[in-house]
Amino acid sequence: MTTTTNWNWPSRVLATAGLALVPWIFALAWVAGEHPVAWIGLDVMEATGLIGTGLLLARCDPRRVAVAPATAVLLTVDAWFDVLTAAPGTVLTAILMATCLELPLAALCTAVARDALRALPRQVWNQLPGRRAGVRRR
């Protein structure tokens, strides 16, 4: 594992999005309606995942293989529940947030995870479940 960082655009976008969630979490805590602990907890996990994925990507840390897809799932679930639980006057806002923020960030996390899997050394790759030793990957 290296300690040097390479802040490319995906790592910057992910870390910045996670940091941008922090003020939102405090605002949500102030005005949250039904089930505030659940929504705040979900957003805290998303912020942690986004910042963690961004940092791990910047450091080329192989642990992003686990953090990035987990964050993608959290973002997708949040988008889904935001749209389903939106009040009648806020459905369009929920759809716009899902399509412009949460789902693109989830797609970016998925791409980070895919690239991280491809970067795994061949020995580790062949030890993954469902892989046979000696089978070449593309």
Image: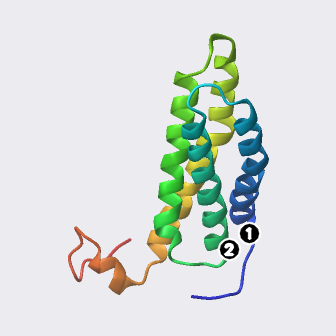
35 or 15, nearer to the observer: 35
Left or right of 8 on screen, residue 110: left
State the separation of the CA atoms marked 2 and 1: 7 Å
Outermost residue on the top side: it is 88
Disc 2 and disc 1 in contact, CB within 8 angstroms? yes
Q: Position of residue 66 (x, y in %)?
A: 46, 66
Task: Specify few, some or many for label 2: CA neighbours under 10 Å numbering under 14, 14-19, or 20 or more.
Answer: many
Query: Where, by quadrant of the figure, is residue 34 drawn?
Result: top right
Q: Residue at x 57, y 48 (%)?
A: 106
Judging by the rendered image, the residue that carries numbered circle 1 is 8
Judging by the rendered image, the residue that carries numbered circle 2 is 58
Nearer the N terminus, badge 2 or badge 1? 1
Say which mark, if any, is on residue 76. Answer: none
Task: Specify few, some or many for label 1: CA neighbours under 10 Å numbering under 14, 14-19, or 20 or more.
Answer: few
Q: Position of residue 7 (x, y in %)?
A: 75, 72
| Residue type (three-letter) at the residue carrying disc 2 | Ala
Circle 2 — which element?
Answer: helix
Mark nearer the viewer, 2 or 1: 2
